[in-house]
Each structure stands twice: as C-alpha cells, then as structure tokens.
Image (cartoon, rainbow, N blue to C red):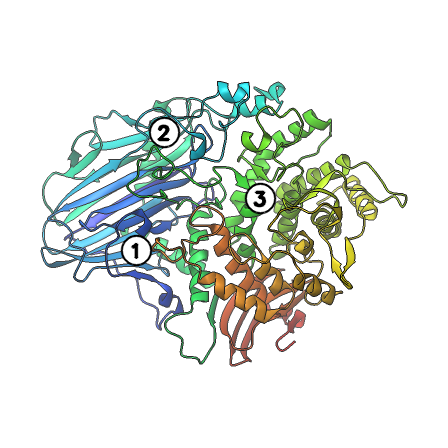
Amino acid sequence: MQPNIRGAWISLLMLAGGARAVDLPKPPQADPLDRFNVVWNSPSENAHGSMPLGNGDVGINAWVDAKGDLVFYVSKTDAWDENARLCKIGRVRVTFDPPLVPKDGFRQELKLRDGVIEISSKIQNQASKIRLWVDADQPVVRMDAEAAVPVSCRAEVELWRLRERPLEPQEDYGYGDGKSPQAQAYKLTVLPDVVAASTAPQVAWYHRNTRSLFPVCLEVQHLEALKGKFADPLLNHTFGASLRGRDMVNDGKTALKSSKPGKRHQLSVCVLAEHAETPEVWLKDLERVEQAALRPGFDQAQLTSAAWWQGLWQRSWVFVEENAGANPEGPSLVTQGYVLQRFMNACSGRGAAPIKFNGSIFSVEKSPGASPTTEEGDPDWRNWGGSYWFQNTRLSYWPMLAAGDFEMTEPWFRMYREALPLSKARMQAYYKFTEAASFQETMNFWGMPNNRDWGWGNAGPEPGNVCIHRYWSGGLELTAFMLDRYDFQPDERFARNTLVPLADPIIAFFDQYWQKRDPDGKIIIDPAQSLEALPWTVNPMPEIAGLRFILPRLLALPNNITTAAQRTRWMRILQELPPLPVAEVGGVKLLRPSGSFKEGNYSENPELYAVFPYRIFGMGKPALELARATYAKRVNRHNFGWCQDSIQAACLGLGEEAAKQVAARAKRITGGYRFPAMWTGFDSIPDQDHGVNILTTLQSMLLQADGNRILVLPAWPKNWDVSFKLHAPSSTTVEGVLKAGKLERLTVRPTARNKDVVNMLGQ
C-alpha cells in the first residue's frame, strides 16, 4: 500500500455457507504476541465499546451491540471538512435476520498477529463466525462470516451531517469565536452530506467542501496578497464512500438488503477523499478505485494482508515481564501498552495525513446517544480541534525509528514539505526574510496557525496566543528527527529531497530573526519564549540546545548533499551560539530553562530538552550528573499525556525511575472505554501522546545510540525480564533476551557492528 492512499475499500464479506474462509497457517510454536490479543466475551453498549482497526489510512471502530447488530464508524486520515476539522466518513449498521445472538458463546477478539477481528456467536442456536480485517496492500477492509443457517442481511448507512447548521464555538477549538469583523463575517458552518442518486444497487454519499476557511486565514493573518498564489487545500475537497453488495438490492435511499436469505452475503464500502472539480468527477474516480480495489482475489488478499502484519511484528518487538518471578496475574500491562500502541500507530500511520494526536482516526462522540449537533454527541468533535500541535504530534514518530517502522514517518515529512512554499512566502511577507521558513507550534495541515491562536483582529506578524507567540522550536526538533531518520537508514535521496530542503530554511529563519549580539559576538535570542512554559525569556534552552544538537550533524553530512554556502552559514551560526543556560540554584549547579526569564504557569521542563529530544546529556556523555541533578530538581512532575519525564529518566540511565513511571502509565486506561489503548491524557481519547511515551521510554531503557556506539540496557531495572528486537543507526538491528539479570542472548546484525556494542547492564 502506498503511504498516500487516495481511496479505500471497506469490504464486508459475510459468509454463511459455500466456500469456507481460508485459515492461515499457524506458527510452529505459540507466539508471545497472541497473549496480548484483546478479547471480549459480551457485546458492547455503544461506540465507547468499539474495537479499532485500520490499514494506515482508513480506520474503523467496530462493535456488536446487544441486539446483534454489527456497527462501525469509518474514518480516513484526510477527511478534512470546510472548517479544517478531521471528520468521520460515516457509520454503517449491519443487521441479520434471524439476528445474531451475542450472549452464550459470544467472543470478539482482535488477533494482532494477523491484523484481524474475529467475532464468534450464534444464529438460531447455530455457531456463526465473522472475520473482519483491513487489507494492508489494497485499500480494502474485509469481513468474512460463517453460519449454519440461511440468513437475510441488511446494511444501512447512518449519517448525522444531515443539514447545514452553525457550528458553535465551544464545539471545536477553533475558528469562529472571535468578535472581529472577519470572525463575524465568516460564520462557522457545517455543510451537509449528500446521498448521490444512482440506478445501481448501491448507496453512495459524500461530503463536499463548497466553502473554505483557507481564504479567511489569509485575510486574518495579513496575507491577502497571497490569494490565488497557493491552491486552496479545502475548497472542493470531497470525501465519502459507496455501499455495494453481491445479490443486494436497494432498501430505501440509504440501505441495501439481500435479495433472498442465503448462507453468504458480501458488502463493500469504498472510501475516497480527494480534490475534485465536480461531484461527478469524484464519483467517476470512486468507481475507478472500486475496480482496482476488487481486482485481487479474496483468498489471496487475506493472506497478503496477514503477511504485512506478521512482517510488522517480526520487524521489532518488546516483551517485558515486570517483577519477574512474582507470579503476575495475566500478561504484562507494560507489554500490553507497548504492543497495542504500536498497533494503533500502524492502523493510522501510512495515510494521506499525519497521525492526529487528539484521538487519531479512532475518536468517537463523548456521550453516545447525545444529539450529534452538540459537542457531546458529535462524532466529529475532538478536543483542541483539527490543528496539528508539534509538541504532541512529534511524540508519535520518535518510537518509529527504533521499531523499524520507517514508512510511517513519511506522512509527517510530506506535510511539512508541502507546507514549505507557503511558509517561505509568509516569512517574506512578514519580515522580508529570504529563503526562510517557520512552522508555528499549532498549525493547520497547510502550515498556518488556526485563527483562534493567531487572534481575530491581531495586527502583528506573530500569533496573539501567548502560549505559542514565539514558539518556533518545533522546526529544530523536526530537523533532529530527520537527522536520526537519516542515521538509521542512510538514504541520499531522503537527505537531498527532505532533510536539507526543510532544515536549511528553518535554520535561516532563526539566523535572520535574531540580529542582536552580545560583546562576545554571541547571538542574543531575544525576543523569545521557552516552549509554552515561559513566554518572556532570553536565550531559551530548547533553541540553544536544538541548534547545538543539529548543526554539527548537518555539517557532518556528505558534501555532495549540502552546499558550501550552507555549510559556511551553519558553521557561523554554531560559533555565534550562546552557551547552554546553566546556573547554581540552592547551591546545586543545574541546567536552566533560559538564560533569564519571568516565572510562568506551565507543565513543562524546558531545561530537560537538552536530554530529550536533544541528546546533549545522557548515558555515555559528559556531565551526566549535572543533567541528573536537573532532573531530580525539575519543577513539574507529570506522568501522563505528552509529558516526557519517563523518556528523560531513561535517557539519563535512571532505570528504576523510568520503570516505575512507564508501569504507572500503562495502567492509566480510560474508564468507560473498553479497548485498553483508549488512553486518557490532556487530549481527546485515545490520547496518542500517552501511549507513544510508553514506546519511546521502553526503547530508551533498552537501547541508546551514542555516535557509533550502541548502548544495550542503559536504563533497565534489576527485576524485569525482557525479550526485544530493536533497530539502531546504520541499518542495524539488536536482538536480546534478559532473564534474572543475565543477558542470555544478544544478536547484532550486521555482525560488523558487534564491535560498537556496549553492554551497560549493571552500570
């Protein structure tokens, strides 16, 4: 499957006879992954009891209700509406007659190894079985069901965007809640979905953006001169689906039913999101996607999809047994958190848009049963809205490197590559900067802040929201991540086409923005802020640490990838940087969040950005005790959502501390939701930041890179056993088994890298 899927099929194949579904061959021995399958022995009340599944771009939340109906939401990573909200495609309800009886013998299981949901139940006291999966190579989700008696089947599309209506400000973090003339002129409005007329036995529907927020953003943010120079990313964007079925006929405008009872029923829902000049063009494109999606045979598609998931799980793994030998009750919660969050990443990480931190594509209404025209009942609502917040978004991507899931990083890079020309134009318009780019902490996917953060009526060139006013350091962390991506898989094309074209204008912005120098010729980074934490500051740690971390690595790139002018500028900036802010506090020398600052009300520790994400301090590096003392004296101590204390503890070799925090984090499962990776944090459920912190923490406890050196078990607690396979720089994998404090096996590939491995156990 290509990273940017333009369309997707959801194919429900409900078999009650005829050829039986192909059973995939079982592994020769029990797979430890199987212990973490999610199993439910009763139906669910509503969407809070749904089970997620996806192919990286298209997702579903599926459940069986008490009546025996199969219900599922359909979602896609780029289903952007006219207000830049990431919406659901729709909901489908499948009913059997005689009905599925979800009580005695009911079982719904997510089988992780094959990426499939299996539902076992009874119809007329006879066993039935349904298998649902999302095709990994073709944009198809398939369900395969068997029963011993003939049944009728009815499938209905359930929509909630039924009429044009105003979107109240409290319904979204957003765009129409200002008092300025622009805010009053642009009334935030939700447009209705359209059910298309068709002579074929199908239901086709779509949401089409006939209006757009984009020109309003240009007006509010003083960029009227750019109108017409950049394509509107929202206008005419159309997303929807078609419902079809073999031997099915229309049953009203929004439903299909089987022409007669049978032992086999097939339904297909094909999903497409794209810019289309007319609805007719979109419908024609949808038809072409349908034809391509159905081309592979059903049995082969089943095998191919399972093979992709098996390849994912074989690429890397972490299986922990905390408190080994203490007879734990059931599988490890730490491992469960790691496995299920990596599953969630895989379900939404290969799409047309990056992973949304606030719910991914699996958020549902806050209060099932509430009116969908309210915040409580709208399945499209998500806390903090449709913008990407860098501090939150980046956390989904850091663990993909050690996991070897490199393809999932591409949607994130693509968003910034596509936003780069507009960013350069903005910096030219605001500051007259040349070839400079800056990406605000909170931005729409086309690279501009949302109007609420900018401030309706704000006359300046920077957002009025004090939390993000001069919060630009995300560009430095993006560069650090791209450098790591290059280190893990040295690829000249990636460096030429993505890394350097993004990094150089990001650095150019900082170079041109701060012109003041101190008597020693060092840059005075003022005005500035240190993350959200300290809005008024001079020489913030994240900017200084970030530049000190990335500039030497950019300079070390092969000369055929960079230019002499770039290298000269980067070297000059590096030489002009002020030192890292350090001061004595209460008689203890500590890293500081900035050189000087006013106290703020915040939940972050900017001083520890020199530990992670900018690994200037850490295991195997100088001044480790300075960094550890800073961690011990940190003001803010949090262990949920996007807070990264556990990652920093692991980077500093504090194994017992990191283990305690990651174990507590893995237990923080949201009450009222059934799937155990519906994390709660600061943001909409499932809070992706909460889960991905588990991944990065465990990986950093097991493996860290220091130049060419590979540090094995740099922060591992004494009483935890583990089996792992992780990736390291220079296309290296490290596989190990630790039991009772003894490293029983360590395999490094390629073997030439064995000389670079340092066993840190016991240090």
Residue 117 is marked as 1
The residue depicted at 62 percent of the width and 41 percent of the height is 497
Amino acid under disc 1? Ile
Q: Which residue is mark 3?
A: 390
Q: Say whether disc 3 or disc 1 marks the residue closer to the N-terminus.
A: 1
> Which residue is nearer to you in this view: 409 or 542?
542
> Which residue is nearer to you in this view: 595 or 249?
595
Task: Look at the image and tell me whether residue 448 can be seen.
Answer: no
Q: Which residue is mark 2?
A: 207
Residue 753 position within the rendered picture, expressed as x and y whole percent measured from the top left: 64, 68
Q: Say whether disc 1 or disc 2 marks the residue closer to the N-terminus.
A: 1
The quarter of the picture where the C terminus appears is bottom right
Rendered image quadrant of residue 507: top right
The residue depicted at 62 percent of the width and 19 percent of the height is 225
Q: Nearer the viewer, mark 3 or mark 2?
A: 3
Badge 3 element: helix
The CA span between labels 3 and 1 is 33 Å
Residue 108 position within the rendered picture, expressed as x and y whole percent measured from the top left: 26, 58
The CA span between labels 3 and 2 is 28 Å
Badge 2 density bin: few <14, some 14–19, many ≥20, Cα 10 Å: many
